[in-house]
Amino acid sequence: MNNQVCENHEKCPIFSGALKGKEMTGQSYRKQFCEAGMDGKNKCKRYMVKQKVGSCPPNLLPNSLKSVEQIINEFSI
């Protein structure tokens, strides 16, 4: 697999859930977060939360304004 592409992108639930039917937004998110190497991963709240605690809320968007700690506390993950 291309190391520039997030290893979670193929199974990321936001594309089949929160962004389902929003192809333009999904494509934009994929380019900005999933396919942007470490720069994208370091901006993606989904990736950062999963790295810290092993999972993340299925509807969490990568550009959430909440901090990683707020997300973890709010969703008790």
Image: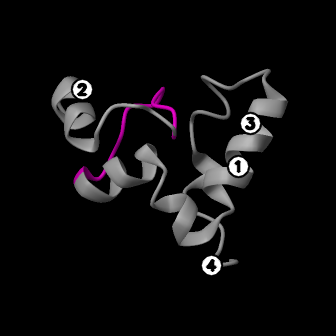
Callout 3: 10 Å neighbours few (<14), some, many (20+)?
A: some
Amino acid at pointer 3: Gly
Callout 2: 10 Å neighbours few (<14), some, many (20+)?
A: few
Could you give the CA–CA distance between mark 4 and mark 2, rounded to whole angstroms? Answer: 30 Å
Could you give the CA–CA distance between mark 3 and mark 2, rounded to whole angstroms? Answer: 24 Å
Percent coordinates x, y for residue 44 in the rendering: 48, 49
Amino acid at pointer 1: Arg
Q: Is residue 1 left or right of residue 59?
A: right
Q: Residue placed at 79% from the left, 21% from the top?
A: 21
> Do labels 4 and 2 touch, CB within 8 Å?
no
Q: Residue placed at 52% from the left, 70% from the top?
A: 38
Amino acid at pointer 4: Asn
Q: Which mark is residue 30?
A: 1
Colouring rule applied to residues: one colour
Q: Residue placed at 79% from the left, 42% from the top?
A: 27
Query: In the depicted view, which residue is nearer to us: 77 or 47?
Result: 47
Residue pointed to by mark 4: 3
Could you give the CA–CA distance between mark 1 and mark 3, rounded to whole angstroms? Answer: 6 Å
Magenta part, dominant SS? loop
Amino acid at pointer 2: Phe
Residue pointed to by mark 2: 75
> Do labels 1 and 3 touch, CB within 8 Å?
yes
> Do labels 1 and 4 touch, CB within 8 Å?
no
Percent coordinates x, y for residue 4 in the rendering: 65, 74
Q: Is residue 21 left or right of residue 67?
A: right
Callout 4: 10 Å neighbours few (<14), some, many (20+)?
A: few
Could you give the CA–CA distance between mark 3 and mark 4, rounded to whole angstroms? Answer: 20 Å
The segment highlighted magenta reads 53-62
Q: Which mark is residue 26?
A: 3
- Nearest to N terminus: mark 3 or mark 2: 3
